[in-house]
């Protein structure tokens, strides 16, 4: 069982389903991901359509949704692991049978980037706590040997429910905050606004934000959208992950978030860079911008 406040944990021998809800995954890459997960002693089953490709998607919407739903509703499956991000998870949300999903036993959900859409919707509809971290078919884990810090974080999270303190590098606004960790990829959070599948807002929470390959003006636009929509109303603090390929967005982040009057810590190894740490969405977080640390007591 998971420790208090964290997602469900795994044991050797547990069955996990590897699904591809977003972008396509090359056969060799997915096969390496299966080997990697089996090295943990897990019984790995692959979604029936995980090897499919339909343009920039890993198969049709219907097939990707079916793989996800079948995995979540299978009582023999203890964890659902998303192979990679890309694009496409939002297209599945209206195709899922949320009543059936709600009757399933709680299980581990792991992914990042585009999988933010699933984290948000599952949290809002099912009350699911989940793991935001590197995916097994991503380059950080299956381009040669897994990046050691990233892989160690996945193992500790899944089997022990443990996340050590994460150091940041820059304090954008001072102070200390406590609250559940919410958020994820900025683009996906902004895209969910106004839909039935938007996840928890940042009210009373520590908001985690990260992104990749977005110009500073686009980061500005998405932050402004979240601000104007009230997503940040009542936020306790803000934790900023990595922003590779985003130019130098720190000035934009400080400008748009500094006026919130809450602590803002930047430079956490969460997101798309190396290493990629695993963090529990929905679990209680302690943000100390002065000590440059995010922890999960």
Image (cartoon, rainbow, N blue to C red):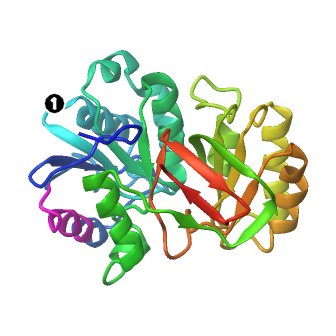
Horizontal side of 108 relative to 240 (left or right) equals left
Number of callouts = 1
**Magenta residue span:** 32-42
Residue 87 visible in the current orientation:
no
Please tell me which residue lies in front, 198 or 293. Answer: 293
Q: Position of residue 123 (x, y in %)?
A: 48, 31
Q: Position of residue 186 (x, y in %)?
A: 67, 50
Which residue is the site of mark 1? 75
Please report the residue visible at 56 percent of the width from the left and 73 percent of the height from the top.
Answer: 273
Look at the image and say whether residue 169 sits in the magenta stretch.
no
Horizontal side of 252 relative to 33 (left or right) equals right
Majority secondary structure of the magenta segment? helix
Look at the image and say whether residue 37 sits in the magenta stretch.
yes
Where's the N terminus, which quadrant?
top left
Residue 139: name its quadrant.
Answer: bottom left
Residue 264 visible in the current orientation:
yes
Q: Secondary structure at mark 1?
A: loop
Please report the residue visible at 76 percent of the width from the left and 37 percent of the height from the top.
Answer: 232
Q: Position of residue 235 (x, y in %)?
A: 73, 38
Horizontal side of 270 relative to 158 (left or right) equals right
Residue 293: name its quadrant.
Answer: bottom right
How many neighbours does mark 1 have within 10 angstroms: few (below 14), some (14-19), or many (20 or more)?
few
């Amino acid at each position: 069982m998971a420790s208090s406040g964290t997602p469900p944990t795994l044991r050797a021998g547990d069955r996990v389903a590897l699904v591809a809800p977003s972008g396509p995954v090359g056969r060799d890459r997915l096969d390496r991901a299966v080997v990697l997960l089996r090295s943990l002693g897990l019984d790995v089953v692959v979604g029936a359509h995980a090897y499919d490709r339909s343009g920039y998607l890993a198969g049709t919407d219907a097939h990707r949704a079916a793989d996800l739903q079948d995995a979540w509703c299978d009582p023999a499956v203890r964890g659902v692991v998303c192979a990679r991000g890309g694009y496409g998870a939002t297209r599945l949300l209206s195709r899922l049978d949320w009543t059936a999903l709600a009757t399933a036993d709680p299980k581990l959900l792991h992914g990042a980037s585009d999988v933010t859409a699933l984290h948000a919707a599952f949290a809002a509809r099912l009350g699911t706590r989940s793991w935001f971290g590197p995916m097994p078919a991503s380059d950080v884990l299956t381009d040669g040997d897994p990046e050691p810090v990233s892989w160690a974080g996945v193992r500790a999270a899944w089997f022990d429910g443990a996340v050590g303190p994460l150091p940041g590098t820059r304090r954008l606004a001072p102070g200390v905050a406590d609250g559940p960790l919410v958020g994820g990829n900025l683009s996906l959070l902004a895209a969910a606004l106004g839909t039935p599948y938007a996840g928890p807002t940042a009210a009373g929470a520590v908001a985690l934000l990260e992104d990749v390959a977005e110009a500073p003006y686009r980061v500005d636009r998405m932050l402004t959208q979240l601000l104007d929509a009230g997503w940040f109303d009542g936020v306790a603090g803000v934790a900023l992950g990595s922003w590779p390929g985003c130019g130098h967005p720190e000035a934009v982040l400080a400008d748009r978030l500094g006026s919130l009057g809450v602590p803002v810590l930047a430079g956490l190894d969460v997101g798309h860079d190396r290493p990629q740490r695993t963090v529990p969405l929905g679990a209680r977080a302690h943000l100390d911008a002065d000590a440059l640390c995010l922890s999960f007591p």
